[in-house]
Image: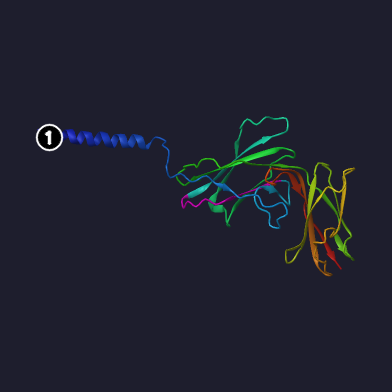
Amino acid sequence: MNTNSPFISIILMCMLLLLVNCGDAIEDPDAPGAPLWVAQSEPTDSRPRGIRPYNEGNGIILEWHPNPEEDLSGYKLYRAAYTEWDLPEGNFSLIADINAFSLSGADTSYIDDLVQFNTDYYYYLRAYDQAGNKSVSSDTVWFSLIPKTDPLTPTGQISAPPLNFEWYDFTNSASDYILFLETVAPRNYIWISRFRRPNYSDFFQSIQFNFDGNAEALISGQSYRWCIKAIVFTDYAGNIIRGSISNWAYFSLE
């Protein structure tokens, strides 16, 4: 009689249970940590960061800190869109699966250019590793884009420093503007100024160059570019949550 047979049966049963359990979906305690968004920089910061409007197109830039996990595979980005007539119901949908290996730099970013104006877009992230384990959701951030302002003057070749900077704002909704003026090569800001909307009567807007005394002198033979950031709403911390930034306008001083 084989006295080892009960023990062999027990071992075989344990192995069978292990094989069955391995096929089940179980929570992984080593799933990636929740992604962290890059905080939005001050509205007048010369190097903007965090969620913000896209300078060269109609889109929203999202930035977050890279997860530290060595086996990180990527990020899933979810979005919900609400107009002023909608009620938030949490109807988020996946809009991007971002491969971690395609990203570089200290922070990671994504441009959502499939957006419409005057719509509140809410976003959250989930990181996942090479085994497919997903992190819990990140915090939710949101932004609402309005149509860009249209820079008018100065542009092209000019013979004297401009007296005014002029643009159109066809939305008529901004309460504040920020003008950014920098040299083209090398990229150095020479004037960043925030001011209240100059004209509430129509779409045309104008501000005197160096009205606040903070601009550096313009130099002959130098090329410059400028843009206008329009601010409609900010949150309690002063972060812009509805606004736009124009395309760059270029001019050279003879």
Q: In the image, is residue 60 part of the stretch drawn in magenta?
A: yes
Please say whether residue 85 is visible from this viewpoint. Answer: yes
In the image, residue 89 above or below residue 77: above
Q: In the image, is residue 207 part of the stretch drawn in magenta?
A: no
Residues packed near mark 1 inside 10 Å, few (<14), some (14 to 19) or many (20 plus): few
Q: In which quarter of the image is residue 125?
A: top right
Q: In which quarter of the image is the N terminus?
A: top left
Q: In which quarter of the image is residue 179?
A: bottom right
Q: In which quarter of the image is the C terminus?
A: bottom right
**Residue 139 pos. (x, y %):** 58, 42
**Residue 140 pos. (x, y %):** 60, 40
* Residue type of the residue flagged with mark 1: Thr
Q: Residue lying farthest left?
A: 1
In the image, residue 124 above or below residue 183: above
Q: What is the basis of the colouring in this image?
A: rainbow
Disc tally is 1
Residue at x 57%, y 57% (from the top left corner): 106
**Which span of residues is magenta-colored?**
59-71
**Residue 160 pos. (x, y %):** 89, 65
Residue at x 46%, y 47% (from the top left corner): 130
Q: In which quarter of the image is residue 146?
A: top right
Residue at x 50%, y 52% (from the top left corner): 68
**Residue 64 pos. (x, y %):** 59, 49
Q: Is residue 119 left or right of residue 26?
A: right
Please say whether residue 180 is visible from this viewpoint. Answer: no
Residue at x 18%, y 35% (from the top left corner): 7
Q: In this view, does 191 lie to the left or right of 9?
A: right
Q: Is mark 1 on a helix, strand or loop?
A: loop
Which residue corresponds to mark 1? Answer: 3
Q: In this view, does 209 lie to the left or right of 31?
A: right
